[in-house]
Amino acid sequence: MNTIKIDKYFRGMVAHNGLSGIETENTIFSFLAAANRSYFGISCELSVSKDNLYIVTGCDSLLKYGLLNLDIPSFSYNELKKFALVDRKTGNLNEFVFIPKFEDYLSICKAYDKYMFIKIKDTLEVDQILKIEDVLKQHDIENEFSLIAENKKHLQALKKIFPTSSLYYHARMVDDDTLDYCQKHGINLYLDHHKLKRDHIKDLHLVGLKVITGVVNDKDTAEKMIKYDVDFLFTNILE
């Protein structure tokens, strides 16, 4: 199995949670698969374990990974690492496929020179995200990342630490209030492709803001979004 190539070159292709159309999402395998391809960037979803370590998963339960309905934040990282996840390629549990640490994702992106798009889970507390800066500094990461949040409280806290140019508001819908919020605070926009219109991109570009669209797995839709002049496109399988 391989990626699906689009007909138009586009520098802003981003592997959503790694190459999740082939490998189990948010795992070392998916990040390495994306790192070895032409993607500009790789995204991940940031969460926290019971012992307050940053981990990479978009789930609250292990059920999505083919296991029992166990609450992920209730386990320490050493406990979580023992859970073998389902390998997307085979459909079977694989002891080498497990929930990684945030540092694993950062190390892969840095080694392969991939831009980092870090999505922060809405359920995290504000004080749980304030140490992101320290982790990035420990890995000598200064400018090669963006942070995406749906929670406006998260964004307001992150504004005090990071330049607004590195922040994206993950909006569930787009209206005048959404556009006004982005423009007022200088925060970029992340929006699902079926809600995104060319005028939204044009209006935000006029004030120096960027737009991410996601998640697009259809060639025609991807090429339409590229013609709209979107800055970045999240995908599971296109390249």
Image: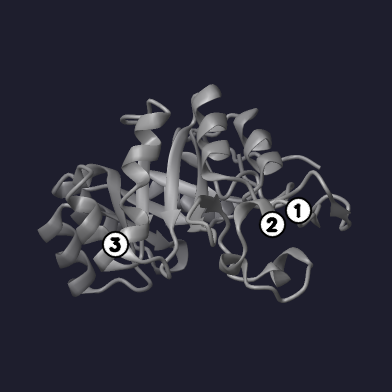
Residue 54 circle label: none
Residue on which the image places disc 1: 82
Residue type at mark 1 is Lys
139, 238: nearer the viewer: 139
User: Image height check: is 232 above or below 174?
Assistant: above
Question: Are dots 1 and 2 in contact, CB under 8 Å?
Answer: yes
Quadrant in the picture for the C terminus: top right
Label 1 Cα crowd, 10 Å radius (few <14 / some 14-19 / many 20+): few
Label 3 Cα crowd, 10 Å radius (few <14 / some 14-19 / many 20+): many
Which residue corresponds to the image point at 76% horizontal and 40% vertical from the top-left?
Answer: 2
Question: Which quadrant of the figure has residue 148?
Answer: bottom left
Question: Are dots 2 and 3 in contact, CB under 8 Å?
Answer: no
- Extreme-left residue of the structure: 184
215, 145: nearer the viewer: 145
Q: In this view, does 153 lie to the left or right of 137?
A: left
Residue 57 visible in the picture: yes
Give the x, y percent position of residue 220. Answer: 57, 53
Label count reads 3
Residue type at mark 2 is Glu
Give the x, y percent position of residue 155. Answer: 26, 59
Of label 2 and label 3, which has the lower sequence position?
2
91, 192: nearer the viewer: 91
**Which is more foreground, mark 2 or mark 3?**
2
- Extreme-bottom residue of the structure: 69
Residue on which the image places disc 3: 154
Residue on which the image places disc 2: 79
**Which is more foreground, mark 3 or mark 1?**
1
Of label 3 and label 1, which has the lower sequence position?
1
Question: Are dots 3 and 1 in contact, CB under 8 Å?
Answer: no
